[in-house]
Image (cartoon, grey):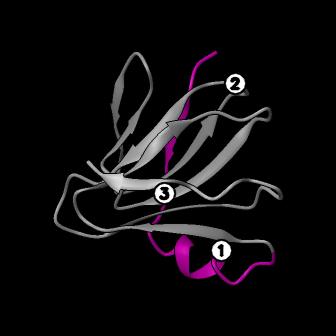
Amino acid sequence: MQIFIFPIPAWTRRLINKLPRWQETGLAPGERIERHSHKFLALYFVYNVTHLETNKEKITLPRSALALVPKDREHGWVVAGAVPGMVGHFHPGHPAHQVKLA
């Protein structure tokens, strides 16, 4: 199943980080979130994250985006630019992201 990426306004971050159950992982320039998958449809809000990686492709992301990742689809996040990035979601029970140097 396909991953969908939708550009969103940058100001949405100020709104969503005030909502209940919001969880976010910050990424410094040159860091990545290791590839992983879930047993549920995942909806992410990403800011200043340059790429989404799967086992088959590397997708360039807009500066602020909503990413819809299907169940069981392997994915990871990369910040290759000079600005820190952030990956956030509202999924209860989502394990902590594993952050590594890219």
Q: Nearer the viewer, mark 2 or mark 1?
A: 2
Q: Residues within 10 Å of mark 1 (few under 14, many from 20)?
A: some
Type of amino acid under label 1 = Ile
User: Please, is residue 2 above or below residue 45 in the view?
Assistant: above
Q: Which residue is mark 1?
A: 16
Q: Which mark is residue 72?
A: 2
Where does residue 69 sit, x and y in percent of width and height? Answer: 62, 34
Q: Earlier in the sequence, mark 1 or mark 3?
A: 1
Q: Which residue is mark 3?
A: 46
Type of amino acid under label 2 = Asp
Q: Residues within 10 Å of mark 2 (few under 14, many from 20)?
A: some
Where does residue 15 sit, x and y in percent of width and height? Answer: 63, 79
The residues bearing labels 2 and 1 have C-alpha atoms spaced at a distance of 26 Å
Q: Read off the magenta span.
A: 1-20
Q: The N terminus lies in which quarter of the figure?
A: top right
Instruction: Out of 25 and 17, give the one closest to the viewer.
Output: 25
Question: Does 53 appear in magenta?
Answer: no
Q: Earlier in the sequence, mark 3 or mark 2?
A: 3
User: Please, is residue 19 above or below residue 76 in the view?
Assistant: below
Where does residue 29 sit, x and y in percent of width and height? Answer: 23, 64
Would you say 22 lies left or right of 98 here? right
Where does residue 18 sit, x and y in percent of width and height? Answer: 69, 84
Question: Does 11 appear in magenta?
Answer: yes
The residues bearing labels 1 and 3 have C-alpha atoms spaced at a distance of 11 Å
